[in-house]
Amino acid sequence: MTAPLLSVKDLSVTFRSDDGDLTAVRGMSFDVMPGEVLAVVGESGSGKSVTSLAIMGLLPRSARVSGSAMFDGRELIGADLKQLRKIRGKDIAMIFQDPMTALNPVFTIGSQIVEAITLHNDMSDKAAWERATELLNLVGIPDPKRRVKLYPHEYSGGMRQRAMIAMAMANEPKLLIADEPTTALDVTIQAQVLQVIRKAQAVTGAAMVLITHDLGVVAGLADRVNVMYAGAVFESGDIDDIFYRTANPYTLGLLGSIPILTARVSDKLTPIPGAPPNLRRLPEGCPFRPRCVFATEVCHGSEPDLMAVNGGRHRSRCYHIDKVAEARAGSTV
Amino acid sequence: MLAYTVRRLFSSVVLLFIGTAVVFGLTSISSNPELLLATCPPTRCGAEFRSEMIQMYQLDKTIPERYVSWLGDAVQGDLGTAVRDGRRPVTEVLGERLPKTLLLAIPAFVLTALIAVALGVYSAVRQYSVGDNALTAFSFIGISMPTFFFGLLLQVFWGVWWQEWTGTRPFYVTGYHNADFMDLVSSLTLPVATLMLVSVAGESRFGRASMLEVINSEYIRTARAKGLPERKVIFHHALRNALIPLVTIWALDFALLLSGSVITETVFAWPGIGSYFLRSITNYDLDPVMAIMVFTAAITIMFNLIADVMYGVLDPRVRYD
Amino acid sequence: MTDLGSRQQLEMAIEAEAAALEAEGLDIEARSMRRQTWDRFRKHPVAVVSLFLLLALTTAFWVGPWLSPYTYDQVLAGLPNEGPSLSHPFGTDQIGRDLMVRVFTGGQISMTIAIVVALLTTFIGTVIGAVAGFFGGWVDNVLSALTNLFLIVPGLLVLLVVAIKWGGGVYSTAVILALLAWPVIARVVRGLFIQFKEQEFVQAAIAAGAKPGRIMFRHIIPNTFGPIIVNATLAVGAAIVIESTLSFLGLGVRPPTPSLGNIIQDYRGAIDSDPTKVLLPGLFVVLITLCANFLGDALRDALDPTSRRGH
């Protein structure tokens, strides 16, 4: 068995503020194998983006990070900035959510890609510009020779995200982190950009962590899925485990197949009644308990561990895995 | 770009005409030479002098008529006569005094901009540090301190206390001295520092706010995620963006420095247009008052125009059409 | 809701979520608006000290001269240029007047002017700003034309020109300053009115047929109190600075009536021999302005619900 490319162990992130500490990530552990695509799914505030920023060392100073993240044999948590900078953009590259604001408005697209290239490679400016044009071509930007000299505001939203992807691919990273890469885009563009991401991953052979709140995005792309809730992994498994052998009420809710028993219908289009928990004051017991239709007395006691389902790699944080399976069977038949 | 500049220039000129008309009206009513004649005893201001004054200031005509006549002369470069200054042409007097005001205003402008950017970047990068909090306190004091009082404070410190402690006087406390270059620098130092106080306090606050906004934007996170060293993130990616709104402030501040020279030059007995303005007002010497106001307004317009063009150079999103 | 804005927005997003939850009643800790404002205000110790100092100074300016055995223009024969003593805590001036009474009376005059200016600018500015923002039309056009004019005409120079003819007295100086300063507040109020006019609760009132006057006074004005109070507080500080400058240049309050500015000018001739007499009244100017600015800043923080975190 090969060693994981990224191995996160017991990662916790706490933000300090005047109104008390806020723990956004609570003891996350997961592995990413070389070339593997891991999807991290959850509602906003579930800690999925904070996890990736913690790995990259990009959190604000008010954040307290503990635990470990081994990347390719190097510890990233607490590593000094000099070491991290060698890895950022070279071995781990990020694609951010909003291409409108993630590119510097006063520099041309080309110069921003060239900067990423020359920073980590001993390459002439001319060669770097040629490479940038090539990359733009690769991500499907028409007329790249002309467009490489344009500014971000002269690109459409979809094109900007393609340019971000080109920039992330520039140094053929071992790991791509895509943080809600399609959320800010038009629905019509989303599928195209996902295609480009898939292509980028295939061309570079990189492993990928795909962060999203949309299980639909995951379906065609991921090998494995981590479902996150209240700063912790609630269900983890191969893609088929998550979609067809769902073992957690929260995942079931995300899949939109939960039987709605509560009368309270949210005006937001959430398939799960209620709102994500207050991270300052988590409920006693299971954090999902107040929103959960399967909740019983046992859920009030202590938070369940991440337990193996059928003994395999498929795991779920729930006391009622059996009942969930029954409900799934009932709703899909 | 050219078409835009021309159009802006045109509307600015229109604005300048309206501005001069308003200012001329106000000044004519306020600094009316008739007030002077009324208080001047007939022994000193005889009938001949009176009729000469009436003719010179066209006091027998209405204010709009006078404005048209003044404007006609002004566009030909004749800004009138400095009656209380040897009846010399105003342009000649300003020719002597303006360079001395610029000697204060230009170094003050450049130094302010440099210091404010440096302080703004420092404060933003080290937000809520001891240094940042100290600068916040300093800027509050700077904004709360009247310019003239800061000038007096400097005069007392360097002219009285420093001399008592050390027996030396490193700077001239009043007046314009130019025996040699060091002499000039010595006489410039305190007035330039005084002139800078308010704008340094204001601009560094503004620079800090602008820089903070940029530092917290997503493209800065992108730059860090690329692996750029922090120095490049701040001085290349962030500063370039943070400077854009500062350009407008600079333009406004240069005009403020010019009008602020009234106070500084009065405190330091500096022979520029600022102290001359105050003297002309109290002497009811109408033409120099008008000339200095119009000059300051024209400079304001010019700097706004420059700021607009600079804006376009710094920010590719701005388009002129 | 976006998942992640920026590094700081991230925290704020989580904060906002927590706040939304509290608002939703899942985690209620109801605090009234006024209570919250006071709690936030108390977190600025400098502002609390400023408020206390301002009140103390104001009291001293009015009560001090009244308690003193001297008046501001009373020449005490044989006592010129006295140093500080028990009977004359600030000493006496070159012709033998008690300096403390003069400075306190000057403070009273300067404070009066500042308060009149703050009230007048706030009143004029609010009325014109409200009308311009709510109705638009010619009032709005005139306001924006004035704004453009003020951008190019050097304000300080105009002030001097106007002051030479119409200034000189306590109230005339105050009125001149107010007439030149009101557009600042008018612009702020105009912006607020334009913003609130579009909001649902106002649109609902309009749809329900409420009269414009009722909408303005019942629905919008209460929401603009915060920024208006902040601007009025800052106007006090600005007015003290400008009044002292004007009086120092000889175009503000004219002697024998003392103001903090003209006292400084009075004693300027003695700057070499007795600099403290020049600096003393000026320190009061700085103190008042500093307090007003700190207070205004803290009020802005406390009254603005979007800046929940303060600093």
Image (cartoon, rainbow, N blue to C red):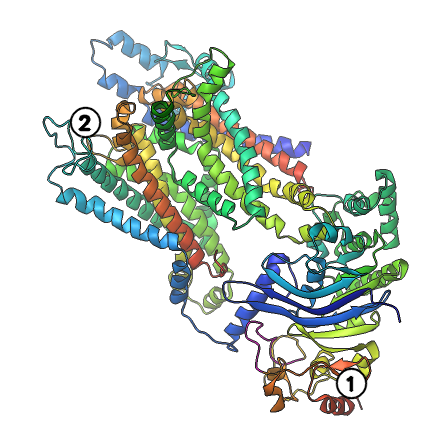
Disc 2 is attached to a residue of which chain? C
State the residue at coordinates (39%, 57%): C225
Q: Which of B218 and A182 is in front in this view?
A: B218
Residue B18 lies, in percent from the top left, at: 47, 31
Q: Nearer the viewer, residue C198 or C100?
A: C100
Q: Is residue C125 visible?
A: no
Disc 1 is attached to a residue of which chain? A
Report the amino acid beneath label 1: Val
Report the amino acid beneath label 2: Asn
Q: Residue A193 carries which label?
A: none
Q: What element carries label 1?
A: loop
Start-end of magenta stretch = A272-284
Is the N terminus of chain B in the top left, top right, bottom left or bottom right quadrant?
top right
**Left/right of residue A263 with respect to residue B93 in the rendered view:** right
Q: Is residue B92 above or below residue A285?
A: above
Residue B254 lies, in percent from the top left, at: 51, 30
Q: Is residue B26 above or below residue C204?
A: above
Tell me the crowding category of disc 1: few under 14, some 14 to 19, or many 20 or more residues within 10 angstroms, Cα based. Answer: many
State the residue at coordinates (11%, 30%): C76
Q: In this view, does A29 lie above or below A74?
A: below
Q: Magenta stretch: residue B263 in it?
A: no
Q: Which mark is residue C81?
A: 2
Marks 2 and 1 sit apart, C-alpha to C-alpha, by: 95 Å
Q: Is residue C150 above or below residue A288?
A: above
Whether callout 2 and callout 1 share a subunit is answered no
The part of the image, by quadrant, that contains residue B122 is top right
Q: Residue A309 carries which label?
A: 1
Q: What element carries label 2?
A: loop
Most common secondary structure along the magenta stretch: loop
State the residue at coordinates (71%, 46%): B229
